[in-house]
């Protein structure tokens, strides 16, 4: 037999395209050298030749020809009378090369080798996959939705590798269909029963950071650096940026002309409001900027207790707190200080209210604009007026007003 075709015998061989050929050849050679050691006690006088492209394997045995009756080591030597049976032209002292037939090992040994090879290649593929995605942690990838389950989504990359997007790493407004391509950041690689499990995320701050890097060339080039990102996925995010070039306005560069750069990111994040602010080492200024879009009147800082008391005009309090308290929560995370909000004129904590702009995902912008024109800027200011009064002032239809009031009241009922 001239050679042993591995493609039929070992399916994993041809499925292992992502394993580099030298490594694959070493594995195959190592498996068959183990087989040789089991049968002959040593593999030193054998040459194992692997053709990785064709999937061919040849094993040759090397022995020195000695005079009949003069043999000391049957593994390394062969008697002259036996050598000329293989090839008549041989003479004493020459080296004889003889091809080893795979069938000589026996069916059981061949089956064991096949299983060992399959196992070794599977382990190699796992190790390569784990390293590949281990090196890509923090990078954005695009993958196809293969299966949607209650607690997670299974995706496939371009090579057919399985990736997991858990529910906890999905934006609340995310909705996926089988076959669609989605973007996410590689969060981590877990090992489960010796198998790598690649975990993706769309809620991690790194996802927003990478989206900004894609959209803003100045960040990619290192002229603008992202100092910190805090997020309430799907609701709001705050991004603190700093420019290494005095000629570049970092906030303007990130937002783009008429919001051209940030709009695509907002859509990707399911209309998440993104506040981009200038980073500063001046704590008072950083706290002030972190409470965007609210404007602070005065501030008291307790550096030891890491607390800040900020005073605002009554119409700014709801902006500072934000819907469900998201704005102030993110400001606390960004600055590392606990921030207490007070009304400037009374020094008392303002009754919780929410700016109407915070409901832009549920209420049409033109309706919000109509309410603002009659002095209703916050949720409570709308709820303080009855349906008839709102209908008279705004020219909005009764059904529309009742629906708006339901949306606003539901927010307060949730606490």
Image: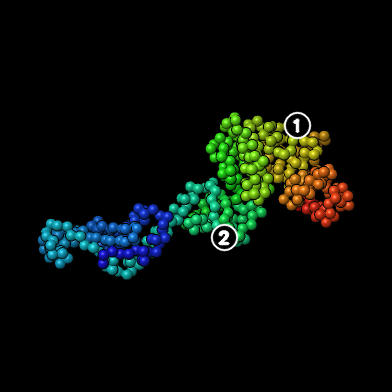
Image point (36%, 54%), residue name = 21
Question: Count the marks: how many?
Answer: 2
Percent position of residue 104, x then y: 27, 68
Where disc 2 sits, the SS reads loop
The foreground one among 223 and 105 is 223
Q: Residues within 10 Å of mark 2 (few under 14, many from 20)?
A: few
The foreground one among 370 and 200 is 370
- Distance CA(mark 2)–CA(mark 1): 53 Å
In the picture, the quarter occupied by the N terminus is bottom left
The foreground one among 385 and 116 is 385
Percent position of residue 323, x then y: 74, 46
The foreground one among 168 and 274 is 274
The residue pinned by badge 1 equals: 298
Q: Is residue 142 left or right of residue 11?
A: right
Q: Is residue 138 visible?
A: yes
Q: Is residue 62 left or right of residue 207?
A: left
User: Is 131 rendered above or below residue 279?
Assistant: below
Image point (25%, 56%), residue name = 44
Q: Residues within 10 Å of mark 1 (few under 14, many from 20)?
A: some
Image point (81%, 46%), residue name = 371
Mark carried by residue 179:
2
């Amino acid at each position: 037999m001239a050679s042993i075709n591995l493609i039929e015998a070992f399916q994993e061989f041809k499925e292992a395209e992502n394993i580099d050929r030298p490594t694959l050849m070493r594995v195959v050679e190592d498996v068959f050298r183990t087989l040789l050691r089991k049968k002959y006690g040593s593999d030193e006088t054998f040459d194992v030749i692997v053709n990785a492209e064709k999937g061919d394997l040849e094993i040759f045995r090397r022995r020195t020809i000695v005079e009949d009756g003069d043999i000391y080591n049957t593994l390394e030597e062969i008697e002259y009378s036996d050598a000329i049976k293989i090839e008549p032209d041989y003479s004493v002292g020459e080296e004889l090369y003889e091809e080893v037939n795979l069938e000589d090992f026996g069916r059981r040994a061949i089956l064991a080798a096949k299983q060992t090879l399959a196992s070794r290649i599977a382990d190699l593929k796992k190790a390569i996959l784990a390293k590949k995605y281990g090196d890509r942690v923090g990078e954005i990838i695009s993958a196809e939705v293969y299966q949607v389950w209650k607690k997670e989504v299974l995706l496939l990359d371009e090579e057919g590798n399985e990736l997991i997007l858990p529910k906890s790493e999905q934006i609340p407004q995310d909705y996926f269909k089988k076959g669609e391509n989605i973007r996410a950041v590689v969060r981590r690689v877990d090992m489960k029963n010796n198998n790598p499990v690649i975990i993706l995320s769309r809620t991690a701050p790194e996802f927003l950071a990478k989206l900004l890097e894609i959209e803003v060339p100045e960040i990619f080039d290192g002229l603008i650096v992202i100092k910190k990102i805090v997020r309430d996925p799907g609701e709001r995010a705050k991004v603190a940026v700093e420019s290494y070039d005095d000629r570049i306005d970092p906030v303007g560069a990130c937002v783009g002309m008429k919001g051209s750069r940030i709009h695509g990111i907002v859509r990707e994040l399911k209309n998440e409001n993104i506040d981009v602010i200038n980073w500063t080492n001046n704590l008072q200024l950083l706290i002030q900027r972190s409470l965007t879009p609210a404007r602070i009147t005065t501030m008291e800082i307790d550096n030891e207790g890491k607390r800040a008391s900020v005073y605002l005009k009554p119409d700014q309090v709801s902006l500072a707190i934000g819907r469900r308290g998201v704005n102030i929560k993110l400001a606390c995370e960004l600055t590392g200080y606990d921030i207490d909000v007070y009304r400037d004129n009374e020094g008392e904590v303002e009754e919780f209210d929410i700016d109407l702009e915070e409901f832009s995902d549920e209420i049409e912008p033109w309706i919000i604009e109509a309410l603002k024109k009659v002095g209703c800027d916050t949720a409570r200011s709308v709820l303080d007026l009855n349906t008839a009064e709102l209908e008279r002032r705004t020219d909005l239809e009764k059904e529309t007003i009742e629906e708006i009031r339901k949306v606003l009241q539901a927010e307060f009922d949730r606490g």
